[in-house]
Amino acid sequence: MPDETRRTIVRAGLAGAVASLAPWAGRAAGEPQQKEGAMAEAKRTVELPGLVDLQVNGFVGVDFTDPALTPDGILKAIAAIEKTGVTRFLPTLITSPLETFSASARAVVRTKHPAIVGIHMEGPYISPEDGPRGAHRREFVRGADVDDFRRRQDAAEGRIRLVTVAPEAAGVLPLIEHLVSSKVRVAIGHTGASGAQIADAVKAGATMSTHLGNGCANMLPRHPNVIWEQLGEDRLLAGFIVDGHHLPPATVKAMIRAKTPARTILVTDAVGAAGMPPGRYTLGGLEVELSPTGRVAAPGAPNLAGSALRLDVAIGNTVKFTGLPLDEVVTMASTRPAEYVGIPTAGKVVAEWDAEAFTLRVERVVL
């Protein structure tokens, strides 16, 4: 794609970051924004920057935290992911022993594909408690340790670009400082931290909340709590999983309003069940089940275990739930995550936008 075309697309996306919050005025959650002009068509063709997903655990039956992961499996997942409009993403390796992490990271590094712009290491320095821990296996959770991270980064040949930690993990503040000095982004997630612990993590250099509203206890005090503390911290961007299962529509609207669109990033947290029929799959060695409704959880367990979400679907859901304009929501899934991890967007996506059904149907991806 010519440089001028790329610059035009990126500028269009960035414009959404400074848009007024006025689109929310006077509308309930899920009520669409008003169309411009009485003759506005429900369906139209739109061009978007290539989408960027910072949290992909797997796709089409491929689990990225699988010690038997191969470049062929990753390429299979990439081919399916690109059909959703995602042209850049971070394969996400969740809590696992050093040996498992290293095997998966080496497979990612051997996969020479421009869609992979780094690795998101989610854990093992997270809360061991039920609820905040989510679907991560308790026996592999450990305290934060700079030497342990260095071994993982060596296995990844320096490709770890984002690390999710819990602010209450032992040894986490020196690790955050080390990550920041190494140009690695730090996110807060899978945590039951206090306000003081969150403030300390931010002071040390944490700059994002991983899937805010999830990866926390099912029951929280009204206030203060780990969600309010992160929502109110302006130095933290926030990732949201907008699949209709992780967060109800009104919660999505209220959280994005509180965080502001300019600090919002859409992620999928997709697992190997994404792009597959209902059935059982794996996530970091844990068996998970995809229901006919699209919900992913360990069989018989109440807690979610990643998602089967596509980023193009997340865009449509966010427009529906918040009433924000499409171009402003697209920014949350393209230029903003790209800027956060310090990469350009790549290519463009040609899609059909149905403003009545809130569906974005990708027609082609131009790279």
Image (cartoon, grey):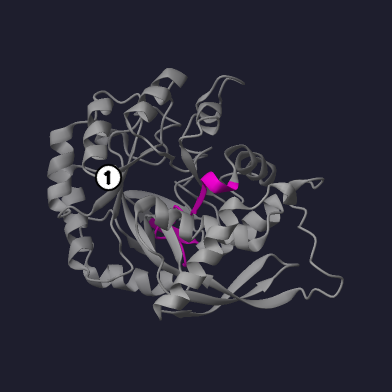
Where does residue 160 sit, x and y in percent of width and height? Answer: 24, 50
Q: Is residue 270 magenta?
A: yes
Where does residue 198 sit, x and y in percent of width and height? Answer: 42, 25
Which amino acid, mark 1? Val
Q: Note whether residue 129 is visible.
A: yes
Residue 77, quarter of picture: bottom left
Q: Residues within 10 Å of mark 1 (few under 14, many from 20)?
A: many
**Residue at 36% across, 31% down:** 166
Q: How many marks?
A: 1
Q: Note whether residue 167 is visible.
A: no
Q: Is residue 14 left or right of residue 3?
A: right
Secondary structure, mark 1, is loop
Residue at the extreme right: 38
Relative to the observer, which residue lies in front, 61 or 72?
72
38 to 131, vertically: above or below: below
Relative to the observer, which residue lies in front, 215 or 286?
215
- Which residues, given as a range, are shown in magenta? 261-281
Relative to the observer, which residue lies in front, 43 or 108?
43
Q: Is residue 18 magenta?
A: no
Picture quarter with the C terminus: bottom left
Relative to the observer, which residue lies in front, 133 or 112?
112
312 to 347, vertically: above or below: above
**Residue at 53% across, 55% down:** 332
Picture quarter with the N terminus: bottom left
**Residue at 54% across, 52% down:** 295
Where does residue 319 sit, x and y in percent of width and height? Answer: 66, 57
Q: Is residue 309 left or right of residue 129?
A: right
38 to 172, vertically: above or below: below
**Residue at 64% across, 53% down:** 19
347 to 180, vertically: above or below: below
Q: Which residue is mark 1?
A: 184
